[in-house]
Image (spheres, rainbow, N blue to C red):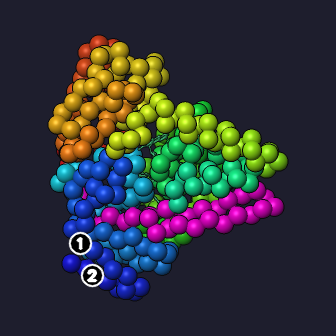
Amino acid sequence: MSLYLPETKFPIQSEVSLAPYTSLRVGGKAEWYIAPENCEQLQDSLIWADKEQLPVTFLGGGSNLLISDRGLPGLVISARNFRYLKIDEEAAQMTVGAGMPLPTVAWKAAKRGWHGLEWAVGVPGTVGGSVVMNAGAHGKCMADTLVTIVIVNTDGHLERLTPEALDFRYRSSNLQYLPRWVVEATFQLQPGYSKQHVTTTTRTHLNQRRSTQPYDKPSCGSVFRNPPEQAAGWLIEQTGLKGFQVGDAQVADCHANFIVNRGQATAQDIYRVMQHVQEKVEQQWSIWLQPEVKLLGEF
Ligand SMILES: Cc1cc2nc3c(=O)[nH]c(=O)nc-3n(C[C@H](O)[C@H](O)[C@H](O)COP(=O)(O)OP(=O)(O)OC[C@H]3O[C@@H](n4cnc5c(N)ncnc54)[C@H](O)[C@@H]3O)c2cc1C
């Protein structure tokens, strides 16, 4: 069934399967789903959800999400149609729509010889989700190059924020706790490098990740945050859990902090693998692994 937003008349769909919109390829249906194409439609969506007293969930590339098999109540708003990229050649800045894939932005910067986002080429999320997660790799993270973001508040107003307002930490920002939609982000790159140098570094990062992580199977990247003592993957591997499997969900052989979907896994299978890993690692090391992946819905 489809409804239409009151002001912009953009369609809202009901009972939309979310599995195709997540990198794990699991999860139930959204009660209501919309992928607005501009700020007016986005604001209209938020006002509609507020009027209907529905909870709102924001969806980026779904590459850090485990969505319950029972689906999500309320309205899921996807960033997939918020894709644009504006380049300020003089300032070496890029302003990017929240739904733009981060690897695309990394390559655009590399091809100009602009240094700063080489690390991001293997992070398969959107710009919006990656700001929220403060995604990072190879010792760098989003906070390093971010100049400003534009958000929509729950009251529907646009606001420009600087990184100081976002309390960036390891894979964390306060956007994870305050329901605010990231519309776009502006990055400051460093010009003056040779194109060949920056593209080579970018390609090296990508190749390194492809050779050490299971890119051929659905996953959500690192499932657990690295505790201060040791890398989560090392702890899981040393606990003998590589290959541990529930249904079609399995601790990856080539990287123990990844759980892969071998075909027919359910979200519950993945959740049970996570629980088993947490319990066994705690028994052996007295460390409780905290999920990096965001669990949405009921488990
Ligand atoms: C193979 C693989 C490798 C990975 N490698 C890395 C890595 O090296 N480093 C790393 O940090 N991560 C990695 N990840 C995890 C993931 O790619 C990152 O966390 C990414 O930044 C998530 O972006 P996303 O758009 O997919 O966000 P989603 O997973 O869709 O959402 C993440 C969170 O952000 C919120 N959100 C999304 N978009 C918006 C928006 N526009 N406004 C407000 N809130 C929003 C969601 O509600 C959710 O809470 C990897 C994942 C995979 C599958």
Q: CB of residue at label 2: within 8 Å of ligand 1?
A: no
The segment highlighted magenta reads 72-99
Q: Are marks 1 and 2 in contact (CB under 8 Å)?
A: yes
Residue at disc 2, secondary structure: strand
- Residue at 29% from the left image edge and 13% from the top image edge: 284
- Residue at 51% from the left image edge and 56% from the top image edge: 101
Give the Cα separation between the discs numbered 1 and 2.
Answer: 8 Å
Is residue 24 visible in the rendered structure shown here? yes
Judge whether 171 appears above or below 153 on screen: above
Q: Which mark is residue 14?
A: 1
Dot 2 alpha-carbon crowd within 10 angstroms: few under 14, some 14 to 19, many 20 or more: few
User: Residue 78 in magenta?
Assistant: yes
Residue at disc 1, secondary structure: strand
Label 2, on which residue? 3
Compared across the picture, whether 79 is left or right of 53 comes to right
Residue flagged by tag 1: what amino acid is it?
Ser
User: Residue 113 in magenta?
Assistant: no
Q: CB of residue at label 1: within 8 Å of ligand 1?
A: no
Between 130 and 212, the one nearer to me in the picture: 212
Q: Position of residue 275 (x, y in %)?
A: 23, 31
Dot 1 alpha-carbon crowd within 10 angstroms: few under 14, some 14 to 19, many 20 or more: some
Compared across the picture, whether 68 is left or right of 198 comes to left
Between 134 and 107, the one nearer to me in the picture: 107
